[in-house]
Image (cartoon, grey):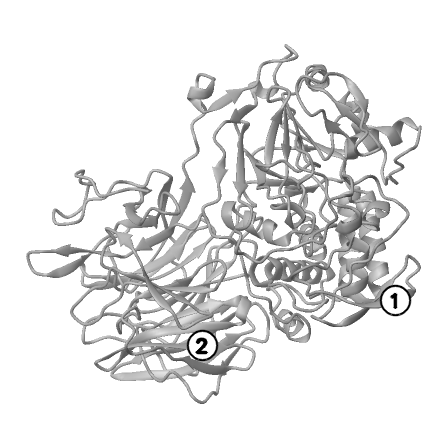
């Protein structure tokens, strides 16, 4: 990102290191003044975010009034509702007052450990449970052995392992570097041993910070105090092994009593660092924010200043902070310059610097502005611009460990406390259920090791019943506003969907960007991939929760005749048991009501397949739903539906007109001239479609007036393509953002194929099955009527379990022959 240069940022001490300002992000400080009922000034306290209310709530707990000898320790806990901007005092803790402790939130429960009170060190652990309900309780935990009393340690959540990791701290005059894991399910502690001779193990320390990456496999330990020295080193520990290593970072400042948070783009944000004073060998607290990142996979991590505006808080340490999406909330802290503690609440909102819309076009400007086609009056003067510089995800791929999904996973889901809503209100209950589903799939989900699903069939039927009226009320051609994000085919590859959300922001009102962006999905949510149920359940739950902010279009696989043959029906049967058939039919009932297209700001048409023989937008608007797809019908509406779901552009810009789509056997191929005439006739600039695999995840056609976007990487485990989505800002600048196909050593879906077969055609009568099973288990193949006809031994699910793809291999990458 940035290297140390000879420029001195304004306001920095003359002995401070010199950093370049980080160019890709900027942030603004806001002093949030909610004095009524605010906690007393304090330091050494904790701050947690709770999922209570649309924007959530902040919990301030415990702490001490000063760092001087005469000080008070607090036992209170107060909640700030970010929507109503009011403080609420909770019942006092029955446990000892404390400071320098840790607290971690698990949904609306908070786990506390350790700290100190006066001259005594504390080693107790307890929950504050039932937040947001009438059953609020302080609950102690009992475990033997325990990490023992300490302060200045860290506690890091690992939701996918249903646990937390404790590292380091201070016990009297003894600095610690031990690591303990707390299992939430059993409420037991386990110590992880390391070799005392390994020089890569971090030295004993306190008042450091720790965090995990998105995969939750790696624990990072940063900074801290080892006595007289202030640390500026990052250590990484693989939680699956006993190995530690040092992460090289250039120009990182000393860190003690600071906070660190991993931003959505995977850069690390530091606040409360120090800069060295060579005159007295001390470290001076700084009010600057720093960002750690790297420019490429091979370049070292470097440190840069984060440019900030607004009401910058005074330098402080031993404060508390929590990151909520792009917003960093900071409360209280000790101000060495003032010799006092604070109870001020600040918010630092971090934003990406949007690329400026260029004044001139062409490759030098990095964009291409589409030529006027119709010569008509532009809506609000807007004009679509294509970015010629795609954005690549910088994060590592998400690779969570398989976990046992079943009784224990459901138990975790059921233990979540509802929001502060009347329990007798059915709407409130439905909303709470939807949020649970979203939170679980976005934050806690891991691939199951058995053919199970975390929701019961009854819950899925209820989800379909609830979302159907919302979808039915939408028009066949939805009108959408920018800014928005557009996703192509997903095909049950749930890892890829999570990868996009982790890299570029997720549709969540607490930690995501749903308040800023509308989300548009172009269809083909199910079939071929391993986790179609996860994909469609999450998308329908998001639709139910956020309404018009989420738009789901119909793809050609959202039809019973298609997803009966390509895997979704079998997945429902095998993972949901006897009621799986009912659930599959309920999903297809919803699919019949899905819209067929969307128009963004009147300038961009988005559909799944293509325009084919469709002439006008009005023809799409007049199509009545629900729709049964009839591929070979001669009725005009059926033919338009078939073209919208199944048609493709020609292989090159040199092929003109409309011709039969011989590869698919239905619908049509349309040339660039058809696209240009369609745009001119309907006064639009761009057509966005999905439906075909493209090597880079996106591909331009018709001189940039049509874009194909495909979001599933390495489709069917063998096409080695990237996945992409489109981000469209308010100025209608269209920017492709892509994630790369999995690394060769990364375990992914491996599909059994027969390359002698041709590209897929519309559904045929044969119905192959796709059983799920334990490794080496004897299973029964079933015919279309569900009757067993033979027994055979299967390979491991991680190797090959998709017989669908042997008989119906995927379409080749657009413009390429089938892979060898």
The image's mark for residue 76 is: none
Q: Nearer the viewer, mark 1 or mark 2?
A: 1
Q: Residue at x 63, y 72 (%)?
A: 404
- Label 1 element class: strand
Residue 173 point in image, percent of width and height? 21, 81
Q: Is residue 528 left or right of residue 441?
A: right
Mark 2, other Cα within 10 Å: few <14 / some 14–19 / many ≥20: many
Disc 2 marks which residue?
181
Residue 449 point in image, percent of width and height? 65, 68
Check whether the beta carbons of the residues at disc 1 and disc 2 lie within 8 A of each other: no
Mark 1, other Cα within 10 Å: few <14 / some 14–19 / many ≥20: few
Q: Is residue 533 left or right of residue 90?
A: right
Give the residue furthest to the bottom: 144
Looking at the image, which is closer to me, 449 or 626? 449
Sequence-wise first label, 1 or 2: 2
In whole angstroms, how far apart are the C-alphas of marks 1 and 2? 47 Å
Q: Residue at x 88, y 66 (%)?
A: 790
Looking at the image, which is closer to me, 711 or 379? 711
Disc 1 marks which residue?
790
Q: Is residue 109 left or right of residue 812?
A: left
Residue 66 point in image, percent of width and height? 24, 70
Q: Quadrant of residue 373?
A: top right
The answer to whether residue 342 of the structure is visible from this angle is no
The relative height of residue 616 versus residue 35 in the rendered view (above or below) is above
The relative height of residue 516 versus residue 203 in the rendered view (above or below) is above
Quadrant location, the N terminus: top left
Quadrant location, the C terminus: top right
The relative height of residue 770 versus residue 689 in the rendered view (above or below) is below
- Label 2 element class: strand
């Amino acid at each position: 990102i940035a290297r140390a240069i000879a420029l001195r940022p304004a306001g920095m001490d003359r002995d401070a290191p010199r950093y370049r300002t980080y160019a890709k992000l900027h942030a603004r400080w806001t002093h949030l003044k909610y004095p009524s009922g605010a906690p007393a000034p304090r330091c050494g306290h904790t701050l947690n975010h709770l999922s209570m209310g649309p924007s959530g709530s902040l919990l301030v707990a415990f702490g001490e009034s000063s760092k001087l000898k005469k000080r008070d320790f607090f036992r209170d806990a107060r909640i700030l509702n970010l929507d109503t901007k009011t403080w609420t005092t909770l019942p006092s803790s029955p446990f000892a007052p404390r400071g320098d402790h840790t607290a971690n939130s698990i949904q609306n429960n908070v786990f506390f450990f350790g700290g100190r009170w006066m001259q005594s060190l504390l080693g107790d652990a307890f929950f504050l449970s039932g937040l947001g309900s009438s059953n609020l309780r302080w609950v102690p935990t009992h475990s033997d052995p325990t990490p023992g009393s300490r302060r200045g340690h860290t506690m890091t959540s690992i939701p996918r392992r249903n646990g937390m990791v404790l590292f380091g701290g201070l016990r009297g005059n003894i600095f610690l570097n031990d690591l303990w894991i707390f299992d939430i399910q059993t409420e037991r502690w386990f110590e992880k041993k390391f070799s005392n001779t390994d020089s890569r193990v971090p030295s004993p320390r306190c008042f450091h910070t720790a965090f995990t990456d998105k995969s939750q496999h790696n624990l990072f330990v940063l900074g801290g105090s080892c006595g007289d020295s202030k640390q500026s080193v990052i250590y990484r520990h693989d939680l699956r092994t006993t190995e530690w290593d040092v992460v090289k970072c250039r120009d990182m400042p000393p860190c003690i009593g600071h906070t660190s948070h991993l931003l959505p783009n995977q850069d690390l944000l530091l606040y409360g660092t120090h800069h060295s004073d060579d005159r007295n060998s001390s470290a001076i607290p700084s009010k600057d924010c720093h960002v750690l990142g790297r420019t490429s996979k091979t370049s070292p991590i470097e440190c840069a200043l984060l440019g900030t505006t607004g009401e910058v808080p005074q330098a402080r340490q031993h404060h508390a902070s929590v990151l909520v999406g792009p917003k960093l909330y900071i409360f209280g802290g000790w101000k060495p310059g003032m010799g006092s503690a604070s109870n001020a609440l600040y918010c630092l909102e971090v934003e990406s610097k949007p690329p400026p819309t260029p004044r001139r076009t062409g490759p030098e400007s990095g964009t291409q502005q589409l030529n006027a086609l119709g010569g008509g009056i532009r809506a609000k003067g807007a004009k679509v611009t294509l970015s010629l510089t795609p954005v690549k995800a910088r994060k590592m791929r998400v690779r969570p460990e398989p976990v046992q999904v079943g009784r224990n996973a459901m138990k975790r889901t059921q233990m979540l406390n509802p929001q502060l809503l009347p329990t007798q209100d059915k709407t409130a209950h439905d909303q709470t259920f939807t949020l649970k589903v979203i939170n679980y799939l976005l934050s806690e989900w891991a691939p199951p090791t058995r053919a199970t699903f975390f929701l019961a069939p009854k819950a899925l039927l209820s989800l379909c019943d609830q979302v159907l009226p919302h979808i039915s009320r939408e028009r066949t051609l939805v009108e959408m506003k920018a800014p928005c994000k557009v996703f192509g085919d997903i095909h049950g590859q749930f890892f890829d969907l999570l990868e996009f959300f982790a890299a570029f922001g997720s549709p969540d009102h607490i930690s995501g960007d749903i308040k800023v962006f509308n989300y548009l999905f172009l269809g083909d949510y199910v079939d071929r991939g391993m986790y179609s149920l996860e994909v469609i359940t999450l998308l329908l739950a998001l639709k139910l929760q956020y309404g018009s902010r989420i738009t789901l279009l119909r793809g050609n696989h959202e039809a019973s005749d298609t997803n009966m043959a390509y895997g979704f029906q079998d997945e429902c049967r095998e993972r949901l048991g006897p009621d799986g058939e009912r659930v599959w039919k309920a999903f297809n009932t919803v699919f019949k009501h899905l819209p067929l297209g969307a128009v963004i700001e009147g300038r961009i048409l988005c559909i799944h397949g293509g325009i084919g023989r469709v002439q006008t937008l009005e023809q799409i608007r007049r199509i009545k739903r629900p729709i049964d797809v009839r591929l070979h019908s001669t009725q005009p509406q059926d033919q338009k539906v078939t073209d919208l779901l199944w048609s493709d552009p020609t292989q090159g810009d040199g092929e003109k007109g409309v011709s039969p789509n011989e590869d698919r056997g239905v619908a049509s191929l349309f040339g660039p001239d058809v696209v240009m005439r369609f745009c001119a006739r309907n006064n639009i600039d761009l057509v966005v479609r999905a439906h075909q695999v493209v090597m880079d995840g996106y591909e331009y056609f018709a001189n940039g007036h049509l874009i194909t976007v495909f979001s599933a990487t390495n489709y069917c485990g063998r096409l080695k393509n990237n996945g992409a989505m489109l981000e469209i800002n308010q100025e209608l600048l269209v920017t492709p953002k892509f994630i790369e196909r999995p690394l060769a050593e990364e375990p992914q879906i491996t599909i059994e194929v027969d390359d002698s077969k041709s590209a897929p055609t519309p559904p045929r009568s044969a119905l192959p099955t796709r059983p799920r099973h334990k490794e080496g288990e004897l299973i029964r193949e079933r015919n279309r009527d569900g009757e067993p006809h033979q027994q055979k031994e299967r390979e491991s699910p991680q190797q090959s379990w998709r017989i669908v793809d042997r008989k119906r291999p995927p379409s080749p990458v657009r413009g390429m022959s089938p892979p060898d």
